[in-house]
Amino acid sequence: MPVLASQPGVTPVIIPVSNVDGGYTGTAELTFHSDHKWTPYPSSGSLLYALEVPTEGGDTYWLNLSLAYETLDEFTKRRIADLQLITYNPFLNKSNTPRSKYRLDKSIPLISLVFPHPLVRTHPESGKKILYLDYATEVEIVGLDPQEGSELIEQLRLHLHQPRFYYQHKWSVGDIVYWDNQATLHYRQAFDPNQRRVMKRISLAGSRPF
């Protein structure tokens, strides 16, 4: 399954997250997401090491998905308790093609395998419930009418969009940050393309969500 910086059959261990020297992710805003959610075994966590940082912008935010779940109303918790969510691989999208946030047109044939995961995930270590959903990647709820599913996902994404769930990190050279990819989303601010932002990322293997 394609992921950031991968080639057929090869995925680098250390990925240059940089806007120079052939690095990845550029300088634009990156919406809240977790890594590898479209694979059968999404990453359990990542480490990011800052080598060069811009004077402004380029901050990273993390969003607490456990707190996001805990603060849902009880009706919504019951409604989503047993739902399965497909997250479609954004790396298979054609460049410069508008990206859907929900798969409404099921007549379009799939171009890869898909792996449904619980919309409410259980953390494998803490046992806490997690709202396992990102902001903008194309998704589909298994077994729901597309319109109903789309409206539910929009409601849940509006709930996620609350600063009380965020932590903002302003990078300094030498910082190393580890995050739990099972229980958080991460977001990057845009920054000036004329400034350098050079980081290295390592992602850790994970287990099948339950």
Image: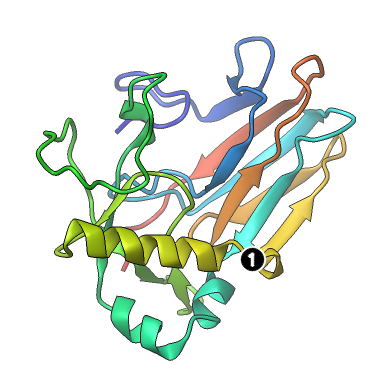
Q: Residue at x 62, y 22 (%)?
A: 26
Say if residue 39 shows up in the picture: yes
Quarter of image, res 3? top left
Residue at position x 32%, y 76% from top? Answer: 80
Q: Nearer the viewer, residue 72 or 12?
A: 72
Colouring? rainbow
Give the percent coordinates (x, y) of residue 123. 45, 71
Q: Is residue 94 left or right of residue 128?
A: left
For label 1, the residue is: 162
Residue 159 at x, y percent in the picture: 53, 68
Amino acid type shown at disc 1: Gln
Q: Is residue 123 visible?
A: no
The x, y position of residue 107, in whole percent, is 9, 39
Q: Secondary structure at mark 1?
A: loop
Identify the residue at horizontal 70%, vertical 70% (top origin). Answer: 164
Judge whether 199 appears above or below 70 on screen: above
Q: At 23% across and 50% down in the image, what residue appears?
A: 115
